[in-house]
Image: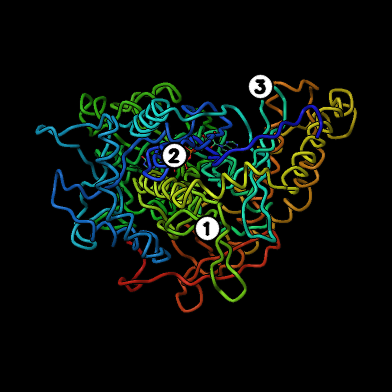
């Protein structure tokens, strides 16, 4: 290997330091099996690799709350939570996973509290809870207060707490390392490890590990208008595709109705839970018409489509920052909320509106529009976090040692649409379960994995992948792009422009509403111009260290690959369900499509039946 490539061995590599990765690292470190291994003189070597400093992970932006039927404010039960989750997902939810999610939610939240999360409190000192869209009592009855919150900064609280616990437990981090390859031994059906690029030193690391967990978060950056931070480029999902695995239900992307107009930044659903109302250009509180009863707190896809319908009917408004621009926004009216209460429970929302729009929500109407928010699909996993392939005969085939959790994964608790507050819960619960799952592999003696590592197995694919990546880095840098690229007809094309144009293509062809023609056009743009451009990208500086353009190029490659997977999955589904609304197939079609898409790079969908236990599919959510 070249002097710029380093080989290392670990027992477990965790890729990602958000709620899912940190929960897994903690569960692993604190597990009985690992404790036992330590007592026997072997301290398992675990490394959390993160392309960001952990506290910059998107989990820290979560605002509104985490769902659990604690029943602190009103009567509640896990059975109601389970039902709402299945119904909110438009019945595409695997019920074994959703049942577990609802049953384990209270313990997960209490565990967070005991770890140090400073939840908001009731007068009696209990964890306070608020309403969130789609959460009801009595199997679809009245809205119920189920989201445990910390003002509107729940993610910040959870991320900092988990990170502090990890630091306290001695977890090792490789910060600002970018994982470029996931390597499997296909013949043996197991994971070999990952290749990572250390942005500080510019060196490539071949990280051999018998256990790898992918917890890389979502892919909101597929779209131009998104609430997601810039790092959410779907890396883990693209790594899985590159390694020959399938992705599940990628056609389901949630559009949150209230992105701040010109930025896409999220204004939490809590702003409507606390009394905010959507109004059209005529001042009408239009949600009553679209969702009588639930109105502004109907499911997110319903509200997003209602906004789009108002805009299409000419009742939209222009962003006041761009008065001559398209009338593609509506108003969020928060003036009915008591200003002191608003500042106490929605400080983040108020601050965002003040700083990014220059408005005062206690007196001004705020322009909003739907923003890409959450990726329901992802790397298919079992309820124990193991990644599997769906074989041609329909059976699940687990890849030994490979795990995934959080937004990059799909255990299918969200189905075709996620309820608010359920994703932090998903990330914490299934992250913990995956960490415990890895630890269990240590139970049978001093770890077969470790013995294998000490014997330094020959993992030729991993070493070859590291060498190839080293060559890729050299090529990206050696082009000495400043002259070469500025000289060619692309001018100074770069990864950021490619990502911007990809986002605009996906906004046009896929967001909120789509049809076969719009999906086909977007796919053609990907296959043509965007693929050519992403293939031609080179770095503009030959600096090996702290060269952010290198990672941006890999991110752009990942996004283009993933976009095709999203579009092919949507093209395969000839119906509308949850967040996917195809105007050419407006009805839900349970007879043919009550099934998960499993899509690999060949764009040929395989279908996996939905796991139904005890809730029969009913009518459309709301
Ligand atoms: C604005 C906003 C508000 C939200 N509010 C709520 C809410 O109120 N309630 C709720 O339940 N959910 C909410 N969500 C969703 C929820 O926050 C996320 O789904 C959840 O936090 C995802 O956690 P995660 O651990 O999967 O990923 P993330 O927290 O996104 O972490 C991903 C990690 O992966 C690392 N990574 C990625 N790619 C690589 C790579 N190639 N190499 C190395 N490392 C890599 C990153 O460095 C990062 O550490 C919100 C989301 C947003 C965007």
Relative to 488, say whether 104 is above or below. below
Q: How many residues crowd mark 1 within 10 Å: few (<14), some (14–19), many (20+)? A: many
Q: Position of residue 424 (x, y in %)?
A: 38, 43
Farthest residue to the bottom: give it.
Answer: 591
Q: Position of residue 619 (x, y in %)?
A: 34, 70
Query: Would residue 253 be found to the left or right of residue 243 on screen?
Result: left
Mark 3 residue CB less than 8 A from any atom of ligand 1: no
Badge 2 is on which residue? 40
Relative to 221, say whether 175 is above or below. above
Mark 1 residue CB less than 8 A from any atom of ligand 1: no
Query: Would residue 238 be found to the left or right of residue 282 on screen?
Result: right
Please, what secondary structure does the residue beneath circle 3 have?
loop
Relative to 186, say whether 129 is above or below. above
Of 590 and 378, nearer the camera is 378
Q: Is residue 485 visible?
A: yes
Q: Quadrant of residue 247?
A: bottom right
Badge 1 is on which residue? 380
């Amino acid at each position: 290997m070249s002097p710029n490539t380093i080989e290392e061995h670990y027992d477990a590599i965790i890729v990602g330091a958000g709620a899912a990765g940190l929960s897994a690292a903690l569960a692993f470190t604190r597990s009985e099996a690992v404790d036992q291994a330590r007592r026997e003189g072997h301290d398992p070597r675990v490394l959390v690799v993160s392309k960001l400093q952990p506290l910059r992970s998107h989990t820290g932006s979560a605002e509104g709350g985490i769902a659990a039927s604690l029943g602190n404010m009103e009567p509640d039960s896990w059975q109601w939570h389970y039902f709402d989750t299945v119904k909110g997902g438009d019945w595409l939810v695997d019920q074994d996973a959703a049942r577990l999610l609802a049953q384990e939610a209270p313990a997960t939240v209490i565990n967070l509290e005991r770890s140090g999360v400073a939840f908001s409190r009731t007068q009696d000192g209990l964890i306070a809870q608020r309403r969130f869209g789609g959460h009801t009592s009595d199997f679809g009855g009245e809205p119920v207060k189920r989201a445990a919150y910390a003002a509107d900064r729940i993610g910040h609280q959870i991320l900092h707490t988990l990170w502090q616990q990890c630091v306290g437990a001695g977890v090792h981090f490789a910060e600002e390392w970018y994982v470029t390859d996931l390597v499997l031994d296909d013949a043996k059906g197991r994971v070999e490890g990952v290749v990572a690029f250390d942005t500080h030193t510019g060196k490539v690391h071949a990280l051999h590990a018998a256990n790898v967990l992918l917890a890389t978060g979502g892919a909101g950056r597929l779209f131009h208008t998104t609430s997601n931070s810039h790092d959410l480029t779907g890396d883990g999902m693209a790594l899985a595709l590159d390694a020959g695995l399938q992705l599940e239900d990628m056609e389901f992307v949630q559009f949150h109705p209230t992105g701040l107009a010109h930025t896409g930044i999220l204004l939490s659903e809590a702003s409507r839970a606390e009394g905010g109302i959507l109004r059209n250009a005529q001042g009408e509180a239009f949600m009553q018409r679209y969702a009588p009863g639930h109105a502004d707190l109907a499911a997110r896809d319903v509200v997003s489509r209602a906004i789009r319908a108002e805009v299409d009917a000419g009742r939209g408004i222009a962003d006041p920052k761009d008065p001559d621009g398209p009338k593609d926004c509506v108003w969020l009216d928060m003036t009915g909320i008591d200003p002191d209460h608003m500042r106490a429970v929605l400080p983040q929302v108020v601050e965002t509106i003040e700083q990014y729009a220059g408005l005062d929500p206690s007196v001004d109407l705020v322009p909003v529009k739907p923003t890409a928010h959450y990726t329901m699909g992802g790397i298919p996993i079992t309820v124990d976090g193991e990644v599997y392939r769906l074989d041609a005969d329909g059976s699940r085939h687990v890849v030994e040692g490979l795990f995934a959790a959080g937004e990059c994964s799909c255990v299918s608790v969200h189905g075709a649409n996620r309820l608010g507050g359920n994703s932090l819960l998903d990330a914490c619960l299934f992250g913990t379960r995956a960490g415990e799952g890895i630890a269990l592999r240590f139970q049978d003696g001093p770890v077969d994995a470790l013995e294998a590592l000490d014997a330094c197995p020959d993992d030729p694919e991993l070493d070859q992948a590291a060498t190839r990546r080293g060559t890729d880095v050299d090529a990206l840098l050696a082009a000495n792009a400043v002259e070469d690229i500025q000289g060619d007809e692309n001018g100074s094309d770069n990864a950021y422009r490619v990502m911007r144009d990809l986002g605009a293509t996906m906004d046009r062809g896929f967001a909120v509403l789509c049809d076969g023609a719009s999906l086909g056009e977007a796919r053609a743009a990907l296959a043509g111009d965007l693929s050519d451009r992403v293939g031609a990208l080179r770095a503009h500086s030959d600096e090996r260290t702290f060269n952010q353009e290198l990672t941006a190029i890999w991110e752009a490659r990942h996004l283009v690959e993933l976009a095709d997977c999203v579009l092919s999955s949507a093209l395969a589904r000839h119906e509308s369900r949850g967040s996917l609304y195809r105007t050419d197939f407006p009805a839900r079609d349970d007879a043919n499509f009550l099934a998960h898409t499993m899509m690999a790079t060949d764009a040929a969908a395989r279908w996996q039946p939905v796991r139904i236990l005890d809730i029969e599919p009913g009518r459309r959510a709301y």
